[in-house]
Amino acid sequence: MTAYNLTHIEELESEAIYVLREVASQFENPALLFSGGKDSIVVAYLARKAFSPAKIPFPLVHIDTGHNFPETIEFRDEFVKSINAELVIGSVQQSIDEGKVVEENGYNASRNLLQTTTLLDTIESYKFDAAIGGARRDEEKARAKERFFSHRDEFGQWDPKNQRPELWNIFNGRKSYGESFRVFPISNWTEMDVWQYILHEKIALPMLYFSHERESFVRDGVIMAATEFIQMKPEEVVEKRILRFRTIGDMTCTGATVSSAASIEEIIEEIAATRTTERGTRSDDKRSEAAMEDRKKEGYF
Amino acid sequence: MGMELLRFTTAGSVDDGKSTLIGRLLYDSKSIFEDQYEAIEETSKRKGDEHVNLALLTDGLRAEREQGITIDVAYRYFATPNRKFIIADTPGHIQYTRNMVTGASTANLALILVDARNGVVEQTHRHTFIASALGIPHIVFCINKMDLVDYEESVFIKIRKEIESFSSKLEVKDVRFIPISALHGDNIVNDSEHMPWYRGGTLLYLLENIHIGSDHNHIDCRFPVQHVIRPQSDDYHDFRGYAGRIAGGVFKRGDEVMILPSGFTSRIKAISNHNKELKEAFAPQSVCLTLEDDIDISRGDMIVRENNQPTIGQDVDVLVCWLNPRPMQPSGKYAVKHTTNDVRCIVKEILYKVDINSLHRVEDDKQVGMNDIARVRLRTTKPLFFDRYARNRITGSLILIDEGTNETVGAAMVI
């Protein structure tokens, strides 16, 4: 009997694959939100496993803020080709050009909030009824309360106080016309689980995650990549640093850590010794204590 | 890589110190990051708290922090060198019992908190009953706030006796008791200096060492077909794979199997996980099966062994926990989700409600409202393939959905 035991990574993989297959079965037109970050790469990889040897039965959707690292975009295009998937791009620049959203100004300008509008518009115009994301419950305290199948009303809003109970491995994806779901197959994974899985499965990642030299500057204690997308303050100085990124988002809100970790093994070692959270380098979460909860209520995934 | 996963749920009444206990577990096992700790330190100071309020770690929603209560299930994660843990932290308020049921449904273990000053209260009975009804194999009672009763052994023993007399009437495999102080950290990660009379291990020691290897059913082969894989490519022209997560038993390549409801038999040709071929697979693995014969199989069918079949039927007796403010409608119709099957049902008969305090059957009041637990007879539109919940938590469970609102209104366990 003792032989029939799964390791925690195998059990988490099995759970995620089950959730992905449930999405394909319960929804007519799902999509996988793909940012080019490690979590969405892992989810896309799991989707490939879930439906193998068939193709992933839904497109990958990238909400492109126009402020991405060029390395992310390069990786995205290669990755999509390698798994023979379909790619849909929602452009924040287009939302700005069409006057649907107004670009923020000033030193802390970010397109992070604007992407919610583009995301909801993309979901609406393609009539996606489920959007799969790589969010994890360990990332942030509002996300700790999220279901695997997260119901959104016709405005894409999350109602945290009135979530559907989610029991056993039965997922209720029933909805009225116009409503949709966000689905999070790796809800139960931690940052460490994701890295261990990447190591175990030898999953390719954008080079941004590995130690490299880059022009950067420090703002509010966070190291930011020097880029034309950020308006620098007079006292801020650009310097070359050996660094890497723990998460990858927009260039305007993704902080780096000084690091010499150049392989997955070294990254795992580094994370095991780290005393700050992954999103501690994300300035978009620091706007207020409930920043994530508020964005999610409005439809941010 | 080789760690086991233990899922546990926590329950307690309001102010039993549940969030503090979890905060303490995370803090003492060094699973809290500096920036998280600084954030709650800051908030505690602002609110004028004497200690750093570890409860703030688990209260994620704005309303929770404002009211100082936990509203919804929060999931927390931590790991020790031996095990990885998923905590479903569930609120103690009576109106949120549905969340405890949610958290309990996937748990291997339940931590139930009892305030040493108050002893066993109505909520303790409710939580114990739910943990037992949801088939949680291990229940650990943490007698908390021992510091406020001078770490008296007699208090602990009195409470333990009271719980034992209640829990002996329930089906619980393994019951443990630990005297703790979550606030001061007694017997959480480190042995308590204040309670030399307690010789059992600390809570963390217990969590790390309790045997959970046999919590899954590896006897009765059950494979609910979740998704049929038919690649639209020349390389796999004739490929038909049956994807799903094994709900029970061990499936081996070459095994003779039967498909329900058709009753056709075939042999397992291959078991795979992407490009990995497996000789055998067991619960709770997600795999893809191919069969020797071309048989019409679709989602909702179940692959089993001919000599070990589940019950096949349209009449199902269940224990239902009601989760919605709108009471269960006698003779009402609901949508049902059971394994990968979607059917409809009618509530044929409400047999009795369970009085959670006395465990007596209540037969004269058959109004099943939110948080009530009742024995009910359902009639489904199509046959289901099910087992007793006590035998298999996957094939023995189903949810009821209100067809008007699409809300999950009932959690049911096959008796």
Image (spheres, coloured by chain):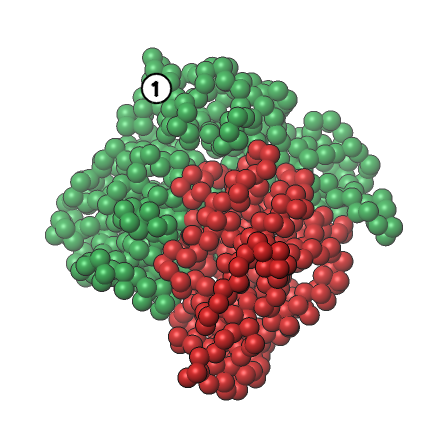
Chain colours: A red, B green
* Position in image of residue B396 (x %, y %): 53, 32
Which of the 4 quarters of the picture holds residue B102? top left
Task: Name the residue: 38% across, 44% down.
Answer: B72
- Most foreground residue, B341 or A93: A93
Left/right placement of residue A157 relative to residue A291 reads: right
Task: Name the residue: 18% across, 56% down.
Answer: B195
Q: Is residue A190 above or below residue A160?
A: below
Q: Residues within 10 Å of mark 1 (few under 14, many from 20)?
A: some
Task: Name the residue: 64% across, 40% down.
Answer: A27
Number of marks in picture: 1
* Position in image of residue B3 (x %, y %): 50, 60
Q: Is residue B331 visible?
A: yes
Q: Is residue A195 visible?
A: no
Residue type beneath disc 1 = Arg
- Most foreground residue, B76 or B181: B76
Q: Is residue B272 above or below residue A245?
A: above
Hey, which residue is sitting farthest top in the picture?
A: B364
**Mark 1 falls within which chain?**
B
Which of the 4 quarters of the picture holds residue B24? bottom left
Give the residue at mark 1.
B361
Task: Name the residue: 56% across, 43% down.
Answer: A181
